[in-house]
């Protein structure tokens, strides 16, 4: 039997499809990471509003402590 030989055009098309699939996966991952970060930030805003209304310094400190995690996630997303 003859070896299967692909044309440069067919090879290029497969490479483009592979890159497209990879790009879609990366975009989906980025979307999930942004949504996760958004949920954490939203929760923090709700907690800080509650801390201010109730003058709950422990809750306020909890929100402050989580800020480093939020910053780290933001940097990870930007990279």
Image (spheres, rainbow, N blue to C red):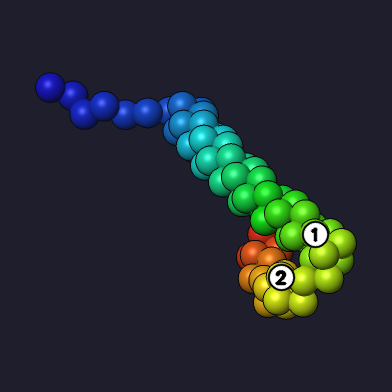
Q: Residue at x 12, y 22 (%)?
A: 1
Residue 49: image quadrant is: bottom right
Residue 32: image quadrant is: top right
Residue, disc 2: 59
Residue 62 in sight here: yes
Residue, disc 1: 50
Q: Residue at x 21, y 29 (%)?
A: 3
Residue 64: x percent and y percent? 74, 75
The Cα atoms of the two marked residues, 1 and 2, are separated by 8 Å
Question: Label 2's element?
Answer: helix
Question: Label 1's element?
Answer: helix
The disc, 1 or 2, on the residue closer to the chain's N-terminal end is 1
Q: Residue at x 62, y 50 (%)?
A: 36
When the figure is inspected, residue 77 is found, relative to residue 27, above or below; the finding is below
Residue with the most extreme left position: 1
Q: State left or right for residue 36 relative to residue 43.
A: left
Q: Are marks 1 and 2 in contact (CB under 8 Å)?
A: yes
Residue 27: x percent and y percent? 62, 42
Residue 21: x percent and y percent? 52, 35
Residue with the most extreme front position: 54
Q: State left or right for residue 8 relative to residue 68.
A: left
When the figure is inspected, residue 36 is found, relative to residue 78, above or below; the finding is above
Q: Residue at x 71, y 70 (%)?
A: 59
When the figure is inspected, residue 61 is found, relative to residue 38, above or below; the finding is below
Crowd rating for badge 1 (residues with CA inside 10 Å; few <14, some 14–19, many 20+): some
Residue 19 in sight here: no
Q: Could you say which is closer to the camera, residue 24 or residue 37?
A: 37
Q: Could you say which is closer to the camera, residue 30 or residue 13?
A: 30
Task: Report the quarter where the C terminus lies.
Answer: bottom right
């Amino acid at each position: 039997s003859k070896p299967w030989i692909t044309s440069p055009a067919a090879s290029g098309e497969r490479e483009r499809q592979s890159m497209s699939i990879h790009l879609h996966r990366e975009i989906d991952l980025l979307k999930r990471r942004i949504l996760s970060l958004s949920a954490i930030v939203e929760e923090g805003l709700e907690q800080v509003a509650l801390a201010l209304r109730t003058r709950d310094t422990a809750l306020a400190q909890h929100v402050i402590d989580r800020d480093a995690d939020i910053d780290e996630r933001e940097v990870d997303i930007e990279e």
